[in-house]
Image: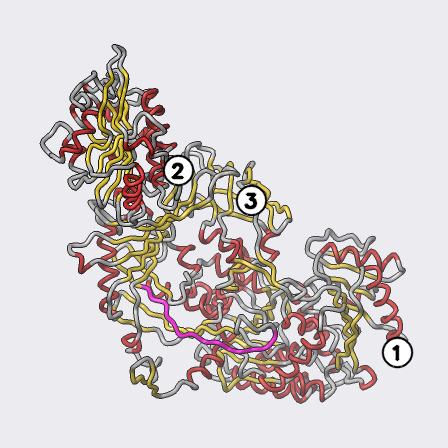
Amino acid sequence: MTSAKALSSSLWPHQAAALEVIDEYLNQEQVGGKSALITMPTGTGKTAVVAAAIENATTGTSRSGKHFLVIAPWRGIVGQLKRDLEYRVWERLNARRSGNFPVISELPTTKQISNLADVEEPTVFVATTAKLLKIYEECDRDEVRMAELFAEIRAVFVDEGHYEPAPRWSTAIRSLGCPTILMTATPYRNDQKFFKVDPSHRFRYSHLKAAKEGFLRSPHFQTVPTSTSDIFVSELVEFVNEKKATHPDTKVIIRCGSAESIRDIVTILRTAGGQAIGIHESFETDENIGLLRSVPNPDKSDADYWVHQFKLVEGVDDPRFRILAFYDRLGTDRGTIQQIGRVLRNPTKDSQDSTAWVFARDGFDVEAVWRNYETFDEKAGEAAATTPSLAKGILFAQPSSVYYDGKFRSMLDLDSEDAWKQFSYPLATRVFRFASLTDLHEIANEVSEEWQAEDREVLKWQFPDDRTIVLPFIDISNSKFLRTATFIEARFGFTIFRIRNEHLFVFDSEGRTPKLMTDAFSRETPTRMSRLLAGESLLTTVSLDNTDLSRRSIRARTIRAAAIGDLAPDLADYAYVCSVAEGYPQVKSEDEKFRRYLGISRSRVRDSRSAERTFAEYAAWLDELSLILEDEGRQPAPTFHRYAHSSDDPSDKSPVHVLLDVDVERFERHLEDGSWEQLRLDDYANDVTNGRTTIKVNGTALAASIVWDADRGRYVFGCPELAQMGFRDRSAPHRELTGVINAEQLLRVVPADLGFMYTNGNFVRPVRPDQDTKQFWLLDVLTAVHPLGSATSEKGEHRNDGNWDPGSVFGLIDQLSLKTLSGESAEMTKHFPDLDMLLCTDLGPEIADFIAVQPDRIAFLHAKAGDGSKLSASALHEVVSQAVKNLLWLQPINVDVPKVGYWGEDWSLKKKNGNQHVVERLRAGSFVQGHGMWSHARSVITNPNADREVWLVLGAVLSESALRAAVENPTPQLIQIYALLQTAWSAVSQVGGRLRVFCSP
C-alpha cells in the first residue's frame, strides 16, 4: 500500500456517517434484541462500511466475542464478499489493511459447526442464509443451542438485506442473540417484518443524493421494436459498438426469461463473433459454447456480453458493466431496479463515465419503472415503504370518536391488555388435533412471524384466559384494481387460538389458515366432524367428491334440498365422499333451531345463530364443540351413511393414479411481460409409476413426483418446474401452488391396494349398498302389506258387482276409496285419508294403473302380480319400466296432456269365457270427463307444497323379509333387484317425487 491511512479514515463522507451509526450501535452495553439498519444504493460502498465496522470493533473492548458473521442470500455474493473483505476494499480506497483485521473464512458446514468454538484466530465468517438455516434446523430450532454455538460471534452483518427474508431464517439469525446490522441497497424494507430495528440506529443514503454526488451513473433508456432474437442481437451489438468507442472496456448484461432464451442469445452473439457467456443454474458448464452454471469473476473473464435470467440481478459490482439489455422483463419493479443498479456503479466519480444505458424491447416501459422508483426514493423513501410504518400511519389516522352504524364509537386502544373485550367473535373455527407442538405461546409466535411475512402487522397479543391467545393484526395491501398506481387498503382482524383437551381451535377473520397448522397438526377426522350434525339433524346441502377418477365421471357435485334425507340416494352415492354438509342440528325446540356449516374435509365449523359475539360466548361454544367431537356415543345423522367414509389405511399406499384436486380459479401468476395468467390443469387422473408422473399445466407437460410420507401420514407432491412457474394463491400471494397442494393435500390418489381412495387428506373405502345393511336405504321405501303376499293376480276372477276381486292387487288398491284404516290395505290407505279422486287408467294409453289424489298429495300407482316368488327380478323389471317411462307426467313444468278421453268410460276386460268384467274407472270423486280429472290431478302436481309419489304395488313379487335376508347374505338376484329399485327411486326423486314400494311381508 502507498497510503498509511486506516480504512475508516479513507471512507467517503456517506460511508463515514453510516460507520458512525454502526459504531454507536455496537458500543452499547446491550442492544436489547434490536437491529441497526443501513440503507445505501448499490455502488456506494456498503461492503467497505462493513469492513470498517469490523476493523473498529476488533480494536474495541466494549463487547465480548472475537469473530464476526456476514450473511448473504446467494452463493455468488459470498465469493464476492470474501474477495472484497480480503483485499478489494482496501485497494479501491487506497487504505492500509490493519494487521489485526480478522482472517476471512466460510462458515463451517453443519457437520463441523461444533468446531466453531475451537477457532482461536479472530475470523470473519461468511455464509449464505441457507447454510445458517440448515444449522438452525439441525439444532432442532433450539435457540439456546444456537447461542452456545455462536457465543464467540461479536456481531452479525446481513448483506443484501432487502431480500424478503423467510420467517425461519430471520428467526435463525435472531436465535444467535448477537447484535445485528442489516445492510440494504433499496429503500423498500421487508426486514422489519422479522427484525426489530432500533430507530436511533438507522442510516439512509438516498439514491438521489448518491447520484448528485457522482457515485452513481444516470441511466438513459433506449427502446427497440419487438422482434426476433436475431434482430434484437443485431441492433444491440450495433448500439454497443457505438458506445464502446468512448469506453472500450464496456461490458453488457442481457436479461432473459428462460434458459432456452439465454442459450439462443449466446449462440447468436458468438456466431456473430462476440465474446458472450450465458449463466443459468440448469447449465452444465461448457466454456467451448459459453454456457456456465455459476457467475465467474469478472476480472478473470474476457466476455463482453453476460447473458442470464436471475444470476446477475445481485452481486455483480464491476463498474465496466455500463449497458443493460432487457430481452425479457423481470417479474417485479424492485427486481428491475436491482438489475439496473448493476450498471450504475461509478466508484471513481468519473464525470466522463456518468452515463449508463438500458436497452429494452417495445412493450416494456422500463423508463417508467425507473421514474416511479426515483419518485419513491425522493418522496416516500423508507418511512412509507414498510408494513409496520404503514400500519402505524393508518392507526394514527383513525378518528378518536365517531358515530357510525347507529352507535357512538371510540378509538380502539390496541396497546391495551383488554383490547380483546372489544372484538366481535363470530361462531366459526377450524379444528385441529395436537401432534408434536403443544405450547400455545410457541404456536402464536410462529404464526405471528408467518403473518409478518404476508404483510400483516401483528399488534399486541391478547390473553383472554390461560387457554387462549388472540393475535390482532392490520392486513395491508394495495388495491387489486390498480396496475401501477397505489391506493393502500387496510383491514383490522385477528387470529385466535384456543386449546381444549386434545383440540386446538383456530379462527382467522380473513379466512387464512397458518401454514404451521398443516405442518405440525392434524385436521380433526371426518368421522368426528360429522358428529356435529348428529342424530335427527336435518341436512339441507351436501358437497360431494367422487372417488371415481375416470375421464367421463363427475368430479364433484353439490346438492341442495329441503331435506337431503328425503331424496333418493343416487346409484353411485356410495362412491362419493361428503366434503361439506350444511343443515340444522338436532335441538330440543323450534326456537333453538339454527343453521350449521360443516367443512368436513377441512375441519371447519360455522354456526348462524343469534349471538352477542362476546369472547365468553365464543369460548363456551368452542368448549361445547370439543365435548361433542369427543363423544363416542354421538352418531352422525343417518344421511352421512349414504356416502363413502374414512377407513383404516391400506397396506400398500404406493400411488398408482393421481388427480390434482385444485381450484384453478384460486391460482394465477404474474408473467414477465406484466400480464397475469390463470392456472390451467388438465382435469384427468395421471398414471404414477415408481412415484413418477407427468402433469399438464397451461399446455406444458411437466415431470412430477408423488410419494407417501409415513412420518407425516400424507402424500408429498413435487414438481420443481411447476414451482418455478410461480403460480400463487390469489388471496395469499406468498403461497406458491405446490406448497399449497402439499399443505392442504389437494389431490386424490388411487393407491396400489385396490378398493381404497385417498381424498381430502384421508383414505376411504367405498362399499356398495347391497353389501352393507347400513347403506341399503331401499329397505326404507318398502312397506309390507300382508294380503299382497297371496295376491298372485292383478285383477282377479271375473265379478258381476262392478268391483275387482278383493284378493287381487287391483282389489287391494280399490280399498283406498273406502278411506278406512281398518281394511286389509290399511298400510296404503293411511296415506290418503282425504282422498278426493281415485282413477283407474288401465287398459289404454295409460300413464299409471291408478291415480290417487287428495289436496296435498298425488300418487301414480303401478300394479304387478307374480307367481309367489319372494324375489322376482323379471316381474320387477316390468313394473319399474312402466313407472319410469311415465314419470314426465309428474313433472310440474310438463304442459302436455295425456290421452284422457277413455277416462270417463268404464273399465272393461273380456274374460276367456266370453264374459265382460266391467268396473267404473272413477272409484272416488265426482268428475264426469277425463279432462276434468286431469285438470284436478294437475292442480296438485303443480302445487309446490304437495307431495308427488309413485307407488309400486307388488303382489307375490317381492318380500321385505326375503330382501333383508339377502342383504345379510347376498344372492345373485340381489344385485339385479337393487339396481332396478335404486334406478326407480333415483328417477322418481329426479322429478321431485317420492317412491313407495308396497310388497309382501
Which secondary structure type mostly characterizes the magenta part of the structure? strand
Ranked by sequence position, the earlier of labels 3 and 2 is 2
**Amino acid type assigned to the residue bearing label 3 in the image:** Ser
Q: Quadrant of residue 233?
A: bottom right
Q: Secondary structure at mark 3?
A: strand
Give the labeled residue for mark 1.
246
In the rendered structure, are the residues bearing label 2 and label 1 in contact, judged by CB atoms less than 8 Å apart?
Answer: no
The C terminus lies in quadrant: top left
Residue 856 at x, y percent in the picture: 23, 45
In the rendered structure, are the residues bearing label 3 and label 2 in contact, judged by CB atoms less than 8 Å apart?
Answer: no
- Residue beneath the point at 26% across and 12% down: 914
Q: Quadrant of residue 101?
A: bottom right
In the rendered image, the residue lying farthest to the top is 913
Q: Tell me: residue 657, above or below residue 243.
A: above
- 758, 108: nearer the viewer: 758
Label annotation for residue 705:
3
**Amino acid type assigned to the residue bearing label 1 in the image:** Thr
**Dot 2 alpha-carbon crowd within 10 angstroms: few under 14, some 14 to 19, many 20 or more:** many
Q: Secondary structure at mark 1?
A: loop
**Dot 3 alpha-carbon crowd within 10 angstroms: few under 14, some 14 to 19, many 20 or more:** some
**Amino acid type assigned to the residue bearing label 2 in the image:** Ala
Give the labeled residue for mark 2.
575
- Residue 485 painted magenta: yes
Q: Secondary structure at mark 2?
A: helix
User: In the rendered image, is residue 107 in sight?
Assistant: yes
Closer to us: mark 3 or mark 1? 3
> How many angstroms separate mark 3 from mark 1 (CA)?
54 Å
Q: Tell me: residue 868, above or below residue 927.
A: above
- Residue 247 painted magenta: no
Q: Quadrant of residue 215?
A: bottom right
Q: Tell me: residue 383, above or below residue 122.
A: below
> How many angstroms separate mark 2 from mark 1 (CA)?
76 Å
